[in-house]
Image (tube, rainbow, N blue to C red):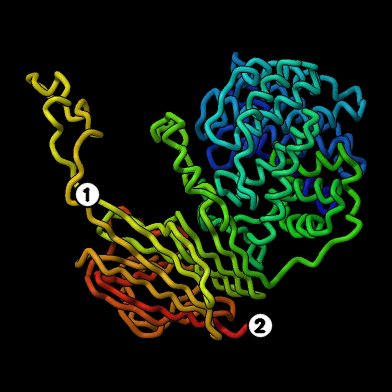
Amino acid sequence: MYKQLVNSNDRAVEQGLPRQMLEPDSPYYGGTIDPHTGIAWVNHTTGTPTDMCYWGAALVNPDSRYYRNEELLDRLKLASAFVLRFQHEDGSISPGWTNYHSPPDTAFVVVGYAQLYQLLAKEAWPPLQPVLDDMRLFLERTIPVMLTGGVHTPNHRWVMCAALGFLHELFGVEEAKQRAAQWLAEGMDITPDGEWTERSNGIYSAVSDIMLIHAARLLDQPQLLEPVRRNLHMMVYLVHPSGEVVTDYSGRQDLGVMHDLSPYYLPYAILARADKDATLAAMAEWAGRSLADPGVCSVNALVRMLLEPELQQPPESTAELPVQYEQILNGDFLRGRYLEGMEKAGHHGQIFHSRLHTDFGAPVARLRDGATSVTLITETPSFFALRHGAVRLLSVQLNTSFYPGFVPMQELTRLPEGYSLKGVQKKGYYGPVAAEQLPPSAAADVSPWYLLPHHKRPLTHEQTLCVETEVHRTAEGWTIRLRCAEPAQVMAQLSFNFGWEGNLTSGELQTVHEDYCLWSGGTLRYSYAGDWIELTGGEQAHRSRSAREASQQNSCKSVLVNLVTPFDKTFTLTLSPSS
């Protein structure tokens, strides 16, 4: 793994050098241009600090062909000066995508920059001193914003703690430990099965893991490793056979987007060695195979390997990872009890610049049988997803005209031969506000709607839509039975969303758009690379081509089935023989 990272780091150096702005009259002089925007940023992903980590790791590593390369050193000097120049007066940075003068995005940079600084300082090579001076000054200037700054999201708290830990280590600032203690006092937002608040297996779970590993060491709080262990062991069951991470129910921007295990490499490798855990070691090896480069600034694996040379050695042993399993995650989590406590929290369901993530701890079932991987989901637009060899059924979603949009399932129950899911939606109307509860503006010449106490209106004519789903495994594949009795004459649309790479053949299809079509009957086959899924159950009970508030997923091929309540509909999914 170490040799692989050294080689990929050298390639990253080559790719970054042509993107550095070398015209002295450019405002981005010394920075590396983000190819997507044409702008040089100071952020931890597409920004100059990430290229600096590649360059710095190469300069001080005798195994790199760029070891002590003077031209690369000159480029690093220009880059460090650019980063310092683009730091705001308050010590923060603006990453470019949003979050201007952002404490948490500054913290991401601090975590990566501090490690690179420590690595370069360890080299004791005098020509590096101008770079070290710039970097140390940048880090020192971040202290005020790290001591006072806030966050948007749950994982940001642990990034702040890691950054504060590094600043305490570098500058001995006792207030940094005190500020971190304030964040840690809020407690760990993780279920007993190991799921973080944001349910973001593709991005932010790995962020929480590595940041708490740093915080545990830097703040001398080893108990912070326990939630990390839980998440890493849970992730054993949240990866498809291809190495694609399960993102079918994420609460963040990785929802339904393809991600691999690479962000988990460092957490797995570090804890596998610390715990002598063969399962974690096997997961580290799996994650390592996905590493196209050492990683962005905040999680650069090669920088960490050079700081901790023991990580360069292969693990003592690795376990066989399971390829046959059936697991319900959060099945015993008392989610309802926590939700009932929201009223006492006092925020009245409102949170700004973020979200409450009330889907935290919702049950998820994961099943794997060799090359077949299935996910059953609650509290998301999709309730079923399947991978079979090379074919991908990314999601199955039901939307209706009752409460326009997708119907999430709230309950998941295990059956002898499968699972049942249930989704309930309610929608009613609201009567006039009682005279004694009206504000003075109601009697004025102008009575704005937004000044009326809408929460005091009496509810009338409330209707309930209940969707029940049974999913059963068969000898050839799966069946999905969908039932909804009332209200009558509710238009519904079930969408099967397949990977963009495959082909739809047979079936009675009417093309609506190049990416989706209506399926009225016949046997439908979706195939790719020799694997296939055949489906039956197409219907066209109404002619609508789309449903309100339910746009189709991007980068997929969608097949839509039009239904009208009451319906009791069964779909069969037959899978190609396993290779």
Counting residues from the start of the chain, the first of labels 1 and 2 encountered is 1
Residue closer to the observer: 138 or 314: 314
- Give the image location of residue 195, x and y in percent: 61, 49
Image quadrant where one finds the C terminus: bottom right
Image quadrant where one finds the N terminus: bottom right
For the residues carrying marks 1 and 2, which lies nearer the camera in this image? 1
Residue closer to the observer: 382 or 14: 382
Q: Going by the image, does 37 lie left or right of 400?
A: right
Secondary structure beneath label 1: strand
Residue at image point 40% right, 67% down: 558
| Location of residue 236 by image quarter | bottom right
Residue 329 visible in rendering: yes
Work out how far the residue at label 1 is from the one at label 2, CA to CA, in angstroms. 52 Å
Q: Which residue is mark 2?
A: 579
Question: Looking at the picture, which amino acid does disc 2 mark?
Answer: Ser
| Location of residue 23 by image quarter | top right
Residue closer to the observer: 35 or 549: 549
Secondary structure beneath label 2: loop
- Give the image location of residue 94, x and y in percent: 56, 26
Residue 500 visible in rendering: no
Assess disc 1: are there few (<14), some (14-19) or many (≥20) residues with their C-alpha within 10 Å of its C-alpha: few
- State the mark number for residue 428: 1
- Placement of 320 over or under 288, stated as above or below: below
Residue at image point 75% right, 19% down: 134
- Give the image location of residue 200, x and y in percent: 57, 48
Q: Going by the image, does 516 lie left or right of 90?
A: left
Circle 1/circle 2 CB separation < 8 Å: no
| Location of residue 513 by image quarter | bottom left
Residue at image point 71% right, 55% down: 233
